[in-house]
Image (cartoon, helix red, strand yellow):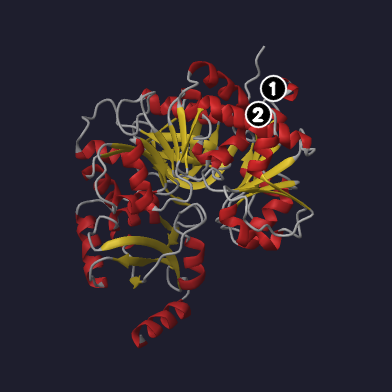
Amino acid sequence: MKEFVVHQLLQHALITHPDQVIVSDGKRFTYREFYSRVLRIANSMKMLGIKKGSVVGVLDVNTNRFLEMHYACSMLGTILHTINFRLAPEQMLYSMIHAVDKWIFVSDIFLQAAKPLFAKFPNWVVMSDNPEQPLPEAKVIYQYEDLIKSGTEKELPEANEIQETDVFSIFYTTGTTGNPKGIQYKHRTILMGSLQLFHHLALHKYGARICNRDVLMPLIPFFHIHAWGMAFFPIYLGVKLVLPGAADPAAQQVLIEKEKVSFLNMVPTQLQMLLEQKNFGHLKVLTGGSPFPSGIAKKANSANVNFSLIYGGSDQLGTAISVIPETVEPDTEEALKWLRAGMRPFPMVEIAIKDKEGNNVPHDGKTLGIIFVRSPWLPKGYYKEPEITKQHFIDGWFRTGDIGYFHTNHSIYVADREGDAIKSGGEWIPTGILETILSENLAIQQVAVIPKNDKNWGQRPLGIVKTKLEVTERVLKDFLLSKVNDGKLAKFWIPDQFIFVDEIPLTSAGKLNKKALRDKYSDETSITNFDTQRKQL
């Protein structure tokens, strides 16, 4: 009987679509050629002593080499650590030590930045097309392409011994509330979660519907849940896959046009940058990772970009994707609203939203609570973190720490992170809804709302905005007041103050870095000092 393991996807694609192509950094590989490279690097890794249970860290952008490592590690039974290069250096080092990385495969893009790490980890492989590139000193160091050349194409007997219950990978959360937390996924769970995502996208007619004629390009990095499963389901489907490497939005635009890319995934900030390029024809985009501002949604719709919003995370995989209800006509304002704000759970996923007493909230489209999730691919907990695990993995459920509510049709809206929502006078103010409404103002390029300490109310909302047009605080308050009159928000939600900045910091996942903003602006003194400095400038 076949095991449900990662490398089986590639072996099946070799039978069904051997001449389909993977495009990476100007190079093109058929699935047959890609499989040959996977066998060669896997056999070379075996010769180096890399074996089942060894942890192999990969520090790279989305390239064919990184994708090859997914399937080579699967064949050997090694544990793939997808290193998050957007973490702070000390957090990245922490994750590598915590995961017990035995070998590090590093792209030449990160070679200079990784030099301080060479003394801490003995075994290195440099992933580069430049054989003449000088290499840092290390106890053991190889060139990836040399290992490809010296490796054989013979099938590995180990590949037939890997079981679906074996650990396939480990990756780490973004580390915005302390050290990053590690999550191990077994072959079965990572594939179930990834393929359910694909099936959910294929089931529904509108939004980012996917099919076997699409050309896929992941802008979500492989370190983040294997590019939201894009390391797996393009191979499963046997479609053309375009890997963007380190391409910026302008270069991504060129790739989209040249390779006829039709389906991408990205966080809202990436979509916003891509939309600043010229129009690129019909595209389908899966976005998520943070509340999706309606301003970006409308701009995407105007640019002929069909999108769906996904909800999930490193510690739960995919959970829900937005769909247009069957009773709503497509290509309407109502349909756009549902694609941005109404997410239907995947088949086999259960979602509960509970109040602070642990009671389920009504499905009334307004009552907020904490979101709990359970599914067949939910992990058991955080790697080597029993106490933190107890706080979040409870009786088979994962306490997400997100605040949301059920629509009356039982889809969900995720309004905020529990730590980001504002408790003012005992009432919740969901910052995600405020940010979404503010994004509709044409003067605003980016916006974050955070809590400001207040002696009377405990907390009050503070708006931090990056603008593209001249605008005043009074104008923004009047804009929100008009939305109060439309019934879209409560008057007490309106921020008492706005701060205008040149840049808003982002996390390693491309989300608004609310922690950095709270550290800088949450108390009166820091805000007063900021305003004083701004006036002096």
Residue at 39 percent across and 62 percent down: it is: 449
Helix, strand or loop at label 2? It is: helix
The residue under label 1 is 155
State the image quarter where residue 136 is shown.
Answer: bottom right
Which is nearer the eye, 325 or 18?
18
Please state the horizontal and vertical placement of residue 528, each as a whole percent of the image: 42, 81
Q: Is 328 situated above or below 471?
A: above
State the image quarter where residue 192 is shown.
Answer: top right
Please state the horizontal and vertical placement of residue 511, each as a whole percent of the image: 45, 54
Q: Measure the C-alpha gap from mark 2 to mark 1.
A: 7 Å
Label ID, residue 39: 2
Q: What residue type is labelled 2?
A: Leu
Q: What residue type is labelled 1?
A: Glu
Is residue 357 something that shows in the picture? no
Helix, strand or loop at label 1? It is: loop
Which is nearer the eye, 392 or 23?
23
Q: Do the residues labelled 2 and 1 touch (CB within 8 Å)?
A: yes
Residue at 72 percent across and 58 percent down: it is: 118
Dot placed on the residue nearer the N-terminal end, 2 or 1: 2
Quadrant (top left/top right/bottom left/bottom right) for the N terminus: top right
Residue found at the far top of this picture: 1
* Mark 2 closeness class: few <14, some 14–19, many ≥20 residues within 10 Å: many
- Horizontal side of 479 relative to 410 (left or right) equals left
Quadrant (top left/top right/bottom left/bottom right) for the C terminus: bottom left
Label ID, residue 333: none
